[in-house]
Amino acid sequence: MFRFKQFEIVDEHCAMKVGTDGVLIGAWADVVSSRRILDVGAGTALISLMVAQRSPEARVTAIEIDEAAIVDAQSNVANSPWSERIEVVCGDIRTYQTQRCFDHIVSNPPYFLNSLHSPDAARTAARHAATLAYDELIGAAERLLVEGGVLSVVLPTECAARFRCEAYGRLWLARLEDVVTCEGEQPKRTLMEFRRVAKPLMPRCSTMTIYGRGGKYSDEYRLLPEEFYLGF
């Protein structure tokens, strides 16, 4: 069990456990003014709970294809302060239908494009883009976002360029932040915000380092998840 300041996460059944990627995108996505948010590939519902905490007026839909993960997601949402504002859906984003579109879609999508598959089928589905290709996630965002709506994703930096190419002309990059684990290293993760607009945007680009010299959290990183972590 992972304890945060306002909620707890159990990941007993979910193939993909709580990790830094989910915390990063849950804290980084600009959801404060959003009223309808969709979490794609919700897993334990960690990101759904984080954005619900950060956007007090929002209603959040957490969609997850894995039935085992749904067990954890439903439990985590039910035991949270925002259970009335979060709907957990067991389904496939590629066929998901709704009468009202979303202001913001947030996702920590599968990302291993060409690596060997794990013998654990659920873990493979959670980690490999074979189950949800990037163009399918982008297509879902085109279909389910309001005009001007936002898609926020976190990916390994090595995969970010491919995702941007898939999105080109369909969704426009508005913000990008590379994440360096330790000072002096190359970026390992990239946070990206795309908008469903008609014209290209001039993206804002930056870099964030998690650990500075001496292995201590950098000041810039500490500001990001401080409202979630205990004893941070």
Image (cartoon, rainbow, N blue to C red):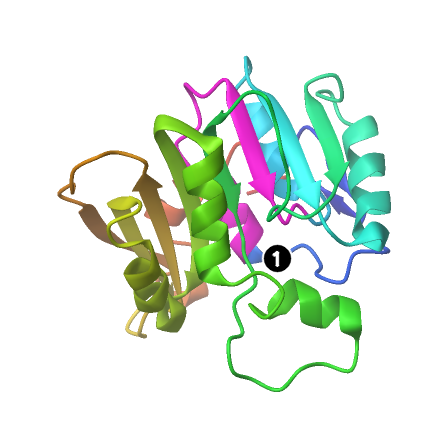
Q: Residue at x 73, y 69 (%)?
A: 123
Mark 1 residue type: Gly
In the visual, does 26 lie left or right of 30?
right
For image coordinates 29% across by 62% down, the residue present is: 165
Residue 217 falls left or right of residue 88: left
Q: Give the residue drawn at x 71%, y 81%.
A: 118
Looking at the rendering, the stretch of residues picked out in magenta corresponds to 21-42
Residue tagged 1: 19
The percent position of residue 90, horizontal first and vertical second, equals 77, 42
The percent coordinates of residue 145 (x first, y second) are 44, 31
In front: 206, or 132? 132
Q: Quadrant of residue 110?
A: bottom right
Relative vertical location of residue 55 with respect to residue 24 in this rendering, above or below: above
Relative horizontal placement of residue 202, taking residue 131 as reference (left or right) = left
Vertically, is 222 above or below 13? above
Residue 231 visible in this rendered orientation of the protein = no
Q: Closer to the camera, 3 or 173?
A: 173
